[in-house]
Image (cartoon, helix red, strand yellow):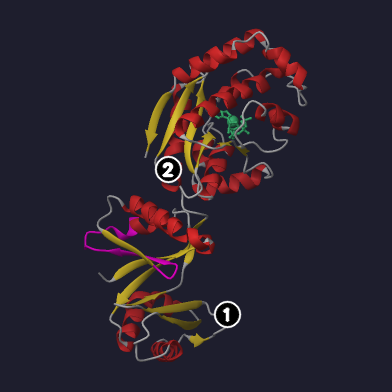
C-alpha cells in the first residue's frame, strides 16, 4: 500500500497519565468512522496516529474526509509511502507532490527520523532531497523561513513517507473522553452549533427535541432529524429523543399568564431533558442560548429555567453574536438545513409581551395549579427514540 493518512493529536498529548485512555478513545472513534471503507490498520506512535490501508479496495478519499471530522485530531496529512532510500524518497516526492512542486516558487524539506539506523541524519537527508528537488524544478528556490511549500519526509521503522504538511483537523478532544450530556436540539441555527461545540470538547451526546404536532409539522421533525444526521459524523451515531410537547403547551396556554408562557414552557423542557439525562447517564444539559438574543435568554430568564434542574446547563454560544454562530453553522454544514422555513414549538405560542425579568414568586404562582409531575411523566412516557447514524 503506498498511501497512508497521518493524524496529529492535539491537546490529548497533554493529558499525562490519562493519555492512554484518550488515545484508546481516539482510535476507537477512528475505527468507527472507517467502518465500511475497507480494512485499515490504525496505530499511534509518538503522538502521531497512522491510518494505513490494508487492501487495495480501501476508499482513501472517503477515509480522508472522515478523518477531517474526528475530534482530537489537530492536523492531518495524506502521505506517500516509499522505500527507505534517499533516491526512492526523491522519486516519491516527484511522483506524489509533482504538481505542487511545479507550482511553488519557494520550498524547504523537513525530515523526521524515527528510525535511528537510517544512514543519514535528518539534516543530511533534508539537504539531499532539497538539493535534488531544487535541480529538478527550476521554478523552485529554497526558503527555510517562509516557504510556500514544505515537503515533509518521515523515516519510520518500516517505510519512509513524504507529504506536503498537515492541514487543520477538527481539533478538540475525542468524543466520549469527557462523559455524556443531553443536548436540546431545536430546528434553529444555534442549537446544532452548541451541540457541536460541546461534542468537540469530548462529550458524547444524546439529543432531545420537543415536538408539538399538529402545531408543528412532520417536516419540522424531519428537519431536526436531518440536523442530527449532519452532526453524527462529528458526534458519533446518536439517539434523538422526540418528546410529545403539545399537551403541555396547550395546558400552559390555558392556565399560564401570557407574559410568562415561554419561561414556564422552558422550565418544562429542562425538567424533561433532565429525566432523559437520568435515563441515559447524561451529566449536563446543552442549549443554544445566547445572552440577550430573545426574551427568554436574559440572565434572569436563564436563572428561572435553570432553577428546575440540578444538572449544569452548558451554553457554549452564550457569549457569541449571531454572525459568529452562523459562521460555525456554515463550517459544519448545518446552516442550510437550519434555515429551512419550518416552525419550531417555541414559535407556535409566542407571547406578544414576554417578561424579560420574571420574578421567582410570579413563576411559582403561574405553576401553582399545574400537576407538574403528571405532565412531565406523560411527556416522558410518550418519547419516541430515533437512532441516527
Ligand atoms: P435555535 O436557533 O437553537 O433554535 P433560538 O435562538 O431559536 O435557538 P430558542 O427558541 O429560545 O432560541 O431556544 C433556545 C434553546 O432552547 C435552543 O437553542 C435549544 O437548545 C432549546 N430549544 C428550543 N426549542 C426547542 C425544541 N423544540 N426542542 C429542543 N430544544 C429546543
Ligand atoms: Mg429555536
Q: Which mark is residue 146?
A: 1
Where does the N terminus fall, quadrant-wise?
bottom left
Q: Which of the marked residues, 1 or 2, is nearer the chain's N terminus?
A: 1
Query: For ligand 1, which image quadrant applies?
Result: top right
**Dot 1, how many residues are within 10 Å of its Cα: few (below 14), some (14-19), or many (20+)?**
few
Report the side of 263 relative to 328 (left or right). Answer: right
Where does the C terminus fall, quadrant-wise?
top left
Where 306 falls versus 74 (above or below)? above
The residue depicted at 68 percent of the width and 11 percent of the height is 368
In contact (CB < 8 Å): disc 1 and disc 2:
no
Under tag 2, what secondary structure?
A: helix
Under tag 1, what secondary structure?
A: loop
The residue depicted at 50 percent of the width and 30 percent of the height is 278
Q: Residue furthest left?
A: 56
- Taking the image as drawn, is residue 169 in sight? no
Task: Calculate the distance from the C-alpha at mark 1 to the C-alpha at mark 2.
Answer: 38 Å
**Dot 2, how many residues are within 10 Å of its Cα: few (below 14), some (14-19), or many (20+)?**
some
How far across and down, in percent of the image, does residue 59 sit? 28, 57
The residue depicted at 49 percent of the width and 77 percent of the height is 149
Where 62 falls versus 355 (above or below)? below
Q: Which mark is residue 235?
A: none
- Mark 1 CB near ligand 1 (8 Å cut): no
Name the residue carrying label 2.
232
What residue range appears in magenta?
45-62
How far across and down, in percent of the image, does residue 135 sit? 41, 91
The image quadrant that residue 85 belongs to is: bottom left
* The stretch drawn in magenta includes residue 227: no
How far across and down, in percent of the image, does residue 210 sit? 52, 24
Report the side of 99 relative to 277 (left or right). Answer: left
Amino acid at each position: 500500500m503506498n498511501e497512508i493518512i497521518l493524524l496529529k493529536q492535539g491537546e490529548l498529548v497533554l493529558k499525562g497519565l490519562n493519555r492512554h485512555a484518550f488515545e484508546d478513545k481516539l482510535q476507537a472513534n477512528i475505527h468507527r468512522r472507517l467502518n465500511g471503507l475497507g480494512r485499515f490498520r490504525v496505530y499511534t506512535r509518538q503522538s502521531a496516529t497512522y491510518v494505513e490501508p490494508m487492501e487495495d479496495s480501501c476508499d482513501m478519499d472517503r477515509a480522508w474526509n472522515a478523518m477531517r471530522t474526528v475530534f482530537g485530531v489537530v492536523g492531518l496529512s495524506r502521505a506517500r509511502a516509499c522505500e527507505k532510500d534517499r533516491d526512492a524518497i526523491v522519486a516519491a516526492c516527484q511522483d506524489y507532490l509533482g504538481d505542487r512542486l511545479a507550482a511553488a516558487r519557494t520550498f524547504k524539506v523537513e525530515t523526521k527520523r524515527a528510525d535511528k539506523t537510517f544512514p543519514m541524519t535528518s539534516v543530511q537527508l533534508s539537504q539531499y532531497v532539497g538539493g535534488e528537488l531544487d535541480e529538478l524544478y527550476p521554478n523552485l528556490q529554497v526558503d527555510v523561513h517562509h516557504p510556500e511549500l514544505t515537503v515533509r519526509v518521515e523515516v519510520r521503522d518500516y517505510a519512509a513517507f513524504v507529504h506536503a504538511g498537515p492541514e487543520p483537523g477538527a481539533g478538540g478532544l475525542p468524543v466520549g473522553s469527557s462523559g455524556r450530556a443531553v443536548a436540546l436540539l431545536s430546528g434553529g441555527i444555534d442549537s446544532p452549533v452548541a451541540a457541536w461545540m460541546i461534542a468537540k470538547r469530548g462529550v458524547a451526546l444524546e439529543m432531545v427535541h420537543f415536538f408539538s404536532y399538529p402545531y408543528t409539522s412532520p417536516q419540522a421533525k424531519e428537519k431536526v432529524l436531518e440536523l442530527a444526521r449532519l452532526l453524527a459524523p462529528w458526534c458519533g451515531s446518536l439517539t434523538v429523543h422526540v418528546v410529545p410537547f403539545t399537551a403541555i403547551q396547550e395546558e400552559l396556554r390555558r392556565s399560564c399568564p401570557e407574559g410568562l408562557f415561554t419561561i414556564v414552557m422552558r422550565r418544562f423542557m429542562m425538567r424533561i431533558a433532565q429525566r432523559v439525562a437520568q435515563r441515559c447517564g447524561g451529566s449536563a444539559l446543552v442549549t443554544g442560548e445566547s445572552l440577550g438574543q430573545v426574551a427568554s435568554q436574559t440572565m434572569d430568564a436563564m436563572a428561572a429555567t435553570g432553577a428546575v434542574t440540578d444538572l449544569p446547563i452548558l451554553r457554549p454560544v452564550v457569549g457569541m453574536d449571531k454572525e459568529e454562530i452562523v459562521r460555525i453553522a456554515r463550517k459544519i454544514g448545518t446552516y442550510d438545513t437550519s434555515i429551512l422555513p419550518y416552525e419550531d414549538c417555541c414559535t407556535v405560542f409566542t407571547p406578544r409581551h414576554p417578561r424579560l425579568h420574571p420574578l421567582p414568586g410570579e413563576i411559582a404562582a403561574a405553576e401553582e395549579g399545574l400537576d407538574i409531575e403528571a405532565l412531565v411523566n406523560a411527556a416522558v412516557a410518550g418519547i419516541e427514540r430515533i437512532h441516527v447514524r
